[in-house]
Amino acid sequence: MKQPNLNRKLVLEAPARVSDGAGGFSEIWTALGELWAEMRARTGRERAEAGMPVSAVAYRIVVRAAPVGSAMRPTPEQRLRDGARVFVIRAVADVDAQGRFLTCFADEETAA
């Protein structure tokens, strides 16, 4: 296996619920830490949502592995942030048998 080129610093974020003061809640994103990553675009598409075009690009994002149960191990429904860009993690898989790296399959959506 070729060594990944971890050249992008991304922020790993997890959703959290906070009380809205009226018996309900709001969802906010909390930063868990930073990860160095290699990013590769996979596929892209455009669709209409609420009458507006939305561009969606799927990415393969490779990061160093962390032990199962660690707060720094990405999981589905968390997200990775690069400034204003947000990548929602859909699935996570081991890259190699030694468990040194993880692949995060993520989507980035932007209004066109």
Image (spheres, rainbow, N blue to C red):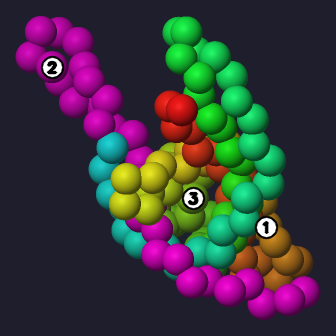
109 left or right, relative to 43: left
Residue 64 on the magenta segment: no
Residue denoted by label 1: 94
Position of the C terminus, as image quadrant, is top right
Above or below residue 57? Residue 39 is below
Q: Secondary structure at mark 1?
A: strand
Which residue type does callout 1 highlight? Asp
Position of the N terminus, as image quadrant, is bottom right
- The disc placed on residue 20 is 2
Q: Secondary structure at mark 2?
A: loop
Residue 92 showing in the rendered view: no
16 left or right, relative to 87: left
Outermost residue toward the left? Answer: 21
Above or below residue 43? Residue 102 is below
Residue denoted by label 3: 74
Q: Quadrant of residue 16?
A: top left
Which residue: 85% across, 77% down?
96
The residue range painted magenta reads: 1-28
Label 2 close to label 3 by CB (< 8 Å): no
Q: Quadrant of residue 104?
A: bottom right
Tell me the CA gap for discs 2 and 1: 38 Å
Which residue: 68% across, 45% down?
57
Above or below residue 2? Residue 19 is above
